[in-house]
Image (spheres, rainbow, N blue to C red):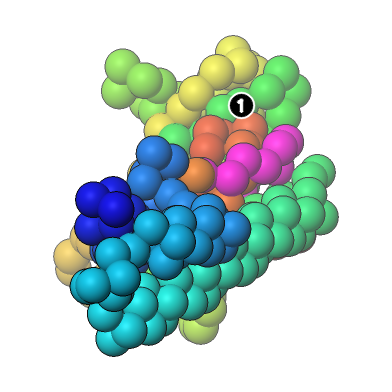
């Protein structure tokens, strides 16, 4: 007969622990059948002279119902998250092989290839100067681009150095300066790269594009071709 309070306490503790936070530790979880078994044992072994408090009994049943509902909600959220992640990856595969435009100051030149990009020209700009330098800062090529009145002004480097020879493949830095009246203003360029694969960042469920110019978050893409 003395086991009744212990069984009741075990049931209450299991419910309280299960209801306290999500996710529930494995060693603190309890199923509906296990809970009912605890309650049945409690009723079977209760002291006839001091029967179990029906209010406490109903409270335990209520707690079990709440825990079950919370566990179902958590399962639904987990399933929804998995579906959204799969959908993101599937959508990202549609970009494979496409050219994307995103913010960046470096780009990789392939053998016989070119580097393209774009920039937003400030109001009143009369000229844009695009400079291409090596990783060490050595100037490889510089050329002028007429700014467009609105939207993005595209530019493209043909991969040739100032002496007309083909520049070696590798990574180059792109800088763009605008001439506005008598002053020069540095601009932030956008570079074009091809999507080779996609990766889902599990830390924030965002999609990253692995391109010829490195990893680019999908949220940073300005245009797709």
Q: Residue at x 46, y 28 (%)?
A: 172
Q: Residue at x 43, y 41 (%)?
A: 26
Say which element carries label 1: strand
The image position of residue 144, as x and y in percent, is 47, 52
Which residue is outermost to the front?
49
Q: Main secondary structure of the magenta part?
A: strand
Name above or below for residue 27 compared with residue 184.
Answer: above
Horizontally, residue 21 falls left or right of residue 94, namely: left
Horizontally, residue 211 falls left or right of residue 36, namely: right
Horizontally, residue 174 falls left or right of residue 82, namely: left
Question: What is the magenta range?
Answer: 191-201
107 and 184: which one is in front? 107
Name above or below for residue 63 compared with residue 207.
Answer: below
Q: Please indicate, yes or no, whether residue 224 appears anywhere in the rendered image.
A: yes
For the residue carrying disc 1, how many other residues have a C-alpha within 10 Å: few (<14), some (14-19), or many (20+)? Answer: many
Horizontally, residue 198 falls left or right of residue 178, namely: right
**Residue 187 sits in which quadrant?**
bottom left
Which residue in the protein does label 1 denote? Answer: 109
Q: Residue at x 45, y 56 (%)?
A: 41
The image position of residue 93, as x and y in percent, is 78, 49
Name above or below for residue 78 compared with residue 181.
Answer: above
Q: Residue at x 50, y 23 (%)?
A: 171
Does the magenta segment cover residue 193?
yes
Name above or below for residue 195 compared with residue 133.
Answer: below
Q: Please indicate, yes or no, whether residue 102 appears anywhere in the rendered image.
A: no
């Amino acid at each position: 007969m003395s086991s009744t309070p212990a069984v009741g306490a075990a049931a209450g503790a299991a419910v309280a622990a299960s209801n306290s936070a999500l996710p529930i530790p494995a060693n603190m979880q309890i199923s509906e059948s296990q809970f009912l078994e605890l309650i049945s044992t409690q009723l079977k072994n209760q002291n006839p002279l001091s029967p179990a408090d029906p209010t406490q009994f109903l409270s335990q049943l209520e707690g079990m119902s709440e825990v079950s509902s919370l566990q179902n909600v958590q399962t639904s959220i987990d399933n929804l998250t998995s579906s959204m992640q799969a959908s993101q990856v599937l959508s990202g595969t549609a970009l494979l092989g496409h050219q994307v435009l995103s913010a960046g100051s470096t780009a990789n030149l392939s053998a016989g290839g070119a580097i393209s990009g774009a920039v937003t020209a400030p109001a009143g700009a009369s000229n844009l100067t695009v400079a291409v330098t090596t990783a060490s800062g050595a100037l490889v090529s510089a050329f002028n681009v007429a700014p467009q009145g609105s939207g993005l002004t595209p530019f493209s480097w043909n991969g040739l150095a100032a002496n007309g020879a083909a520049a070696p493949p590798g990574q180059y830095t792109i800088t763009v300066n605008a001439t506005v009246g008598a002053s020069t203003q540095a601009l932030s360029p956008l570079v074009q790269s091809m999507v080779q694969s996609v990766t889902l960042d599990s830390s924030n469920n965002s999609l990253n594009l692995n391109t010829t110019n490195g990893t680019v978050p999908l949220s940073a893409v300005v245009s797709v071709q």
